[in-house]
Amino acid sequence: MRKLLLAAVLANILLVSNAFAADADEQAIRSVLTKATENWSAMNVDANDAYYATDANAAWFDIAPLKYVGWNDYKAGVKKVFAGFESLSLKLNDDLAVQRRGKTAWATYTFSSEMKMKGGKVETGEGRGTDILEKRGGKWMIVHEHLSFPAPM
């Protein structure tokens, strides 16, 4: 009877510790996405080196152009776009959803944007995104991102 009780206690400890680890991973992923969004909003492209994988063959689908290949290509393209902005405000909406399987995770979300162009024109919109992340060296890194705005109907 004592062995059975001890086994039950140990099983519960393992289940609880796995749940805490899963919660910690989800919080870490949410933190990566929040910080990356804050960096984009501040137009601080280089700060996102800490959150995006630098793989030379990684594919990034931003609003335009059709596709960037590699982190350096993505950074250079975004810097060109940001050169035409006076300011940018991006806000993740409250529908951020994270799924995780081992060292791979994906997140879906919508976001609000306000882009103030040099010259004063302001554009606002609601967009959507999907990110794929991998846990590398104990850190969650974005390895693929796809952003878009819905087509006008």
Image (cartoon, helix red, strand yellow):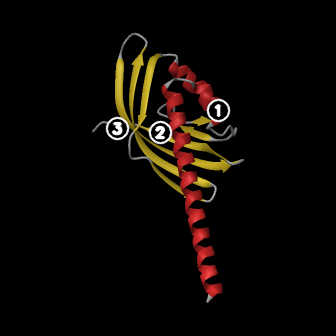
Residue 62 lies, in percent from the top left, at 50, 35
Q: CA distance from mark 2 to mark 1?
A: 18 Å
Q: Is residue 122 left or right of residue 148?
A: left
Residue 30 lies, in percent from the top left, at 51, 45
| Helix, strand or loop status at disc 1 | helix
Measured along the vertical axis of the image, is residue 68 above or below residue 120?
below
Q: Which residue is mark 1?
A: 49
Q: Which residue is mark 2?
A: 147
| Helix, strand or loop status at disc 2 | strand
Measured along the vertical axis of the image, is residue 114 above or below residue 118?
below
Could you tell me the amino acid type at mark 2? Leu
Front residue (pair 81, 1): 1
Q: Is residue 16 visible?
A: yes
Marks 1,3: beta carbons within 8 A: no
Could you tell me the amino acid type at mark 3? Ala
Q: CA distance from mark 1 to mark 3?
A: 31 Å
Residue 52 lies, in percent from the top left, at 62, 38
| Sequence-first disc among 1 and 3 | 1
Measured along the vertical axis of the image, is residue 64 above or below residue 31?
above
